[in-house]
């Protein structure tokens, strides 16, 4: 498969950054987070400011439960590439998991400033708002997300949950 072929490429050409990136992604998709982190770290050894490697390593660290490492990687990725909306979204979701909803909303707002019609980020901001008790704000975000992508089931699910918790049966 892909991991074997990309590993062979790296045996022949250890400095092939694209092969490291693709193998890191394949390992992540296989839930081999340790291997993905290893590939990203090798990329960062050569280019410490590589925002893709920082972001990808942050995802793998987050999947392993390394909140501190993931936060550090997302923050460094944002410094290296401040116009990447998806890194703000990823860090925002990490902050939601840590129950730091206000900081999460700030990251989602930054992402939406860069890409205002991102229905996933809108839905994620709605989740942060709902979890901090702002059901009206959360439901507004879910509705906006569904206006942009009517079939986005996470937003529809979270909208239903917010309505349930608000007592709107």
Image: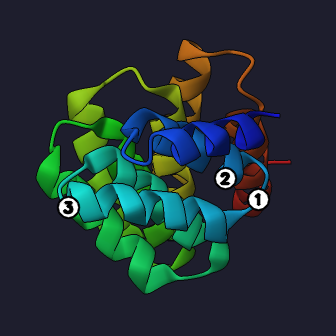
Quadrant location, the N terminus: top right
Residue 165: percent from the left, percent from the top? 74, 62
Residue 169: percent from the left, percent from the top? 86, 48
Residue 71 visible in the picture: yes
Whether the residues at callouts 2 and 3 have beta carbons within 8 Å, the answer is no
- Give the CA separation, mark 1 to mark 3: 24 Å
Task: Tell me which label, 2 or 3, sits earlier in the chain.
Answer: 2
Mark in the foreground, 1 or 3? 3
**Residue at image point 65% right, 41% down:** 8
Q: Secondary structure at mark 3?
A: loop
Whether the residues at callouts 1 and 3 have beta carbons within 8 Å, the answer is no
Q: Nearer the viewer, residue 88 or 61?
A: 61
Q: In terms of image quadrants, where is residue 145?
A: top right
Residue 59: percent from the left, percent from the top? 52, 59
Q: Nearer the viewer, residue 52 or 169?
A: 52
Task: Tell me which label, 1 or 3, sits earlier in the chain.
Answer: 1
Q: Secondary structure at mark 1?
A: loop
- Give the CA separation, mark 2 to mark 1: 5 Å
Residue that label 1 marks: 31
Residue 134 visible in the picture: no
Q: Is residue 20 left or right of residue 88?
A: right
Q: Secondary structure at mark 2?
A: helix
Whether the residues at callouts 2 and 1 have beta carbons within 8 Å, the answer is yes
Q: Nearer the viewer, residue 105 or 32?
A: 32
In this view, 31 is above or below 50? below
Q: Nearer the viewer, residue 55 or 129?
A: 55
Q: In terms of image quadrants, where is residue 127?
A: bottom right
Residue that label 2 marks: 28
**Residue at image point 66% right, 53% down:** 28
In the picture as drawn, the residue positioned furthest to the front comes out as 12
Residue that label 3 marks: 48
């Amino acid at each position: 498969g892909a991991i074997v072929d990309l590993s062979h490429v790296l045996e022949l050409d250890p400095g092939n950054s694209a092969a490291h990136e693709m193998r890191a992604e394949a390992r992540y998709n296989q839930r081999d987070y340790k291997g993905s982190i290893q590939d990203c770290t090798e990329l960062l050894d050569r280019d410490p400011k590589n925002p893709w490697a920082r972001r990808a390593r942050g995802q793998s660290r987050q999947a392993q439960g390394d909140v501190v490492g993931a936060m550090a990687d997302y923050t460094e990725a944002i410094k290296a590439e401040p116009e990447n909306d998806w890194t703000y979204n990823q860090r925002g979701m990490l902050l939601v998991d840590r129950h730091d909803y206000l900081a999460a909303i700030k990251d989602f707002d930054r992402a939406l400033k860069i890409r205002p019609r991102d229905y996933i980020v809108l839905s994620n901001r709605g989740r942060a708002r709902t979890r901090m008790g702002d059901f009206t704000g959360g439901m507004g975000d879910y509705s906006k997300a569904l206006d942009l992508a009517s079939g986005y089931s996470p937003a529809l699910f979270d909208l239903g949950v917010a309505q349930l918790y608000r007592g709107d049966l």
